[in-house]
Image: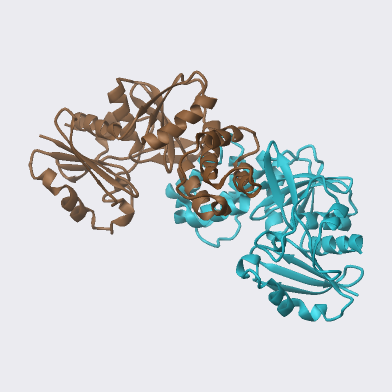
Chain colours: A brown, B cyan
Amino acid sequence: MSLVAIDWGTSSLRGALLDDDGKVIEERLAPRGILSVASGGFGALFEELFGDWMRDRRNTCLISGMAGSKQGWVEAPYCACPAGQSDLAQKIIEIEPGRIAVVPGLSDMHDGVPDVMRGEEVQVFGALALGGMGDGLFVLPGTHSKWVSVKAGKVTGFRTAMTGEFYALLSQHSILARTMEPNARLDEAAFLEGVARADNGRGLLHNAFGTRTLALFDRMPARETSSYLSGLLIGEELRSQSFHSAGELVLIGTPALTQRYRLALGRSGKGLAVRSFGAEATWAGLHALSQVIR
Amino acid sequence: MSLVAIDWGTSSLRGALLDDDGKVIEERLAPRGILSVASGGFGALFEELFGDWMRDRRNTCLISGMAGSKQGWVEAPYCACPAGQSDLAQKIIEIEPGRIAVVPGLSDMHDGVPDVMRGEEVQVFGALALGGMGDGLFVLPGTHSKWVSVKAGKVTGFRTAMTGEFYALLSQHSILARTMEPNARLDEAAFLEGVARADNGRGLLHNAFGTRTLALFDRMPARETSSYLSGLLIGEELRSQSFHSAGELVLIGTPALTQRYRLALGRSGKGLAVRSFGAEATWAGLHALSQVIR
């Protein structure tokens, strides 16, 4: 029997067919995030994309991510921190009893302001399983980066940083876009200049404007300004998180993103060990969770 | 003889006819910022909107703002700080000799990163004239807020903060927009909650996300979240500027905006005196400058 593991996010949908040991038999990717699915249309789309994987009646399916949000397939209320795998397992919401279930996200609270995530918790549990770890500080860069603390196998707390979304807003919709070359490749020197700049104590609202004036005064070529802005934002994210006592930091994300964090940490996180995981963490997390539920 | 004083910005155009003492005879406002004017179309538009004010051949015209930028009527290169009124006067660019001229903006440099403004310098000189001051710290809130230091009548330096533009981006284009009531009125309590929050040392990238989660968890009504976000951003701007030794701070802007800064300063700028000027600062600045040129 196999596990159909699904990571159904806001803008994309990934699925994997896993064997009993968690090994990936096949992977599928579709540009069908929950924002592209009409309310009530989730079941039919699931059948269309993954129906063949579910033909074998012994196969089960676990879905993580925004599919469990109010705007998703079925709402799976957040599980409050601290939370381990068994807490998540107890709060799954079954769509087809014994066969298809949605994993809840996690919530945390900081001085009266809630924080939430959906999907990243599964990646963290996957990285724990893959790395044979029980504790750690995990960083999941993205549209909304998550900084997740784990102790004895439980997520004790986490914080969101809107780094990727700020980057998209500023590079596409702000005045900075006018002196920025779209789709320029990462320029490491300009990126690190931005990271260093973020530490000057003058704040992001001021530093961001420099992305425009550096180009305006021909002090930085337009093809480098997107890297500089990316460095400013990731530098600002690192500046605001406390991780220097962590010893090790575990990055989970695409190589393109984790590379930038490694670069930035190389500058500011002296003596910090950095480990990275990619998409495999999602599949390992859903597989580990399926073992707990079983 | 009269002065035709023009403040020609990115998105709007204001003009005033001033008598020899600087008193406003008539004011005009048009939604014709430089972005709405085709290259080469500035002269005709000026004639259409202000031609009657220029019929008297003794009248002269001074234009400040983005009309002096590369994308404007005629480029007036930035004047480097420190700069006083006479420095500006020497660098005006005449469009019609002896009759119509454009005022340059100012530039400053912070550790190799340039900073610029166009139009705000005239408002600062106007406030100096109106208030009978020679020194001070001036804050001009807006899309791009400017913090301007003046000593002995000269602008010694300034810093930009993209506060207004960040607010527009986040409240219109980000995920925060989904739980925000557009055009909601200022809620002072929510605004001050945001200002206080900005001081928690966790950074804007993290704090901004709370605007969404507070609404998501029904901890703040949707009609209050735009005020909260505004407070977060203005609080972040204040946090990053050093003004506590200033004694007095002079705000120049619309009453709606200066009111927010007064509120925020009331919380964090204990013991700081705050004075405000509005549009009259622009006219007073252009009038004072015309006296220097004459």
Residue A73 in the image, given as x and y percentages of width and height: 26, 51
Closest to the observer: A279 or B235? A279
Closest to the observer: B20 or A57? B20
Q: Can I make out residue B46 in this image?
A: yes
Q: Can I make out residue B207 in this image?
A: no
**Vertical order, B234 against A154 (above or below):** below
In the figure, residue B268 lies in which quadrant? top right
Tell me the quadrant of the picture where the N terminus of chain A can be found: top left
Closest to the observer: B274 or B163? B163
Q: Is residue A88 left or right of residue A169?
A: left
**Vertical order, B108 against B293 (above or below):** above
| Residue depicted at x 69% and y 53% | B141
| Residue depicted at x 88% and y 54% | B86
| Residue depicted at x 34% and y 50% | A11
**Vertical order, A120 against B215 (above or below):** above
Residue A165 in the image, given as x and y percentages of width and height: 46, 46
Closest to the observer: B281 or A61? B281
Tell me the quadrant of the picture where the C terminus of chain A can be found: top left
Residue B225 in the image, given as x and y percentages of width and height: 53, 52
In the figure, residue B195 lies in which quadrant? top right
